[in-house]
């Protein structure tokens, strides 16, 4: 399994997707096809943390008056399943590995994986 979870309206996601040859990857646009509980469980199996999957940049945090300093792992899980913007993006998921987000190190690790 090789899946990419992204937003087509996110310029950063699109820039990263264009950077790599992903012809064998399954693409999942999160706004049109929200994350399922099973998919979140697959991601969690790699990270062992819902917080690691959570985007602290989501506009929904302010809109819902959420204080991230008081969230538990269960809170993160519930929020990740309620709105696509809570997932840190893009997420590249394989059977063995997960690459979450767009920071330089994550994208570099992804590049090494894809080019190996």
Image: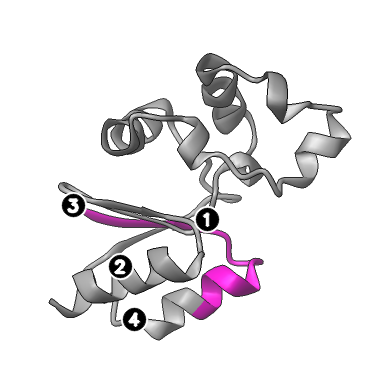
Q: Secondary structure at mark 2?
A: helix
- Specify the segment rendered in magenta: 2-15
Name the residue: 57% across, 60% down. Answer: 7
Q: Secondary structure at mark 3?
A: loop
Between the C-alphas of marks 4 and 3, the distance is: 17 Å
Residue hosting label 3:
1
Name the residue: 52% across, 24% down. Answer: 77
Of the two numbered discs 2 and 4 in the rendering, the one whose residue sits closer to the viewer: 2
**Looking at the image, is mark 4 or mark 3 earlier in the sequence?**
3
**Image spot of residue 22 (x, y percent):** 29, 75
Between the C-alphas of marks 3 and 1, the distance is: 18 Å
Name the residue: 52% across, 15% down. Answer: 74
Res 20 label: 4
Q: Does residue 103 appear left or right of residue 82 in this picture?
A: left
Between the C-alphas of marks 1 and 4, the distance is: 16 Å
Residue hosting label 1:
89
**Looking at the image, is mark 3 or mark 1 earlier in the sequence?**
3
Q: Is residue 108 magenta?
A: no
Q: Secondary structure at mark 4?
A: loop
Of the two numbered discs 2 and 3 in the rendering, the one whose residue sits closer to the viewer: 2
């Amino acid at each position: 399994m090789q899946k990419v979870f992204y937003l087509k309206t996110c310029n950063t996601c699109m820039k990263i997707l264009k950077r790599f040859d992903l012809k064998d990857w399954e693409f999942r646009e999160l706004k049109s096809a929200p994350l399922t509980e099973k998919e979140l469980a697959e991601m969690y199996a790699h990270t062992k943390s819902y917080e690691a999957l959570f985007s602290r940049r989501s506009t929904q945090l302010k809109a819902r008056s959420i204080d991230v300093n008081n969230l538990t792992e269960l809170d993160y899980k519930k929020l990740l399943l309620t709105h696509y913007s809570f997932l840190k993006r893009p997420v590249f998921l394989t059977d063995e590995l997960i690459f979450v987000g767009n920071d330089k190190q994550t994208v570099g690790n992804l590049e090494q994986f894809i080019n190996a």
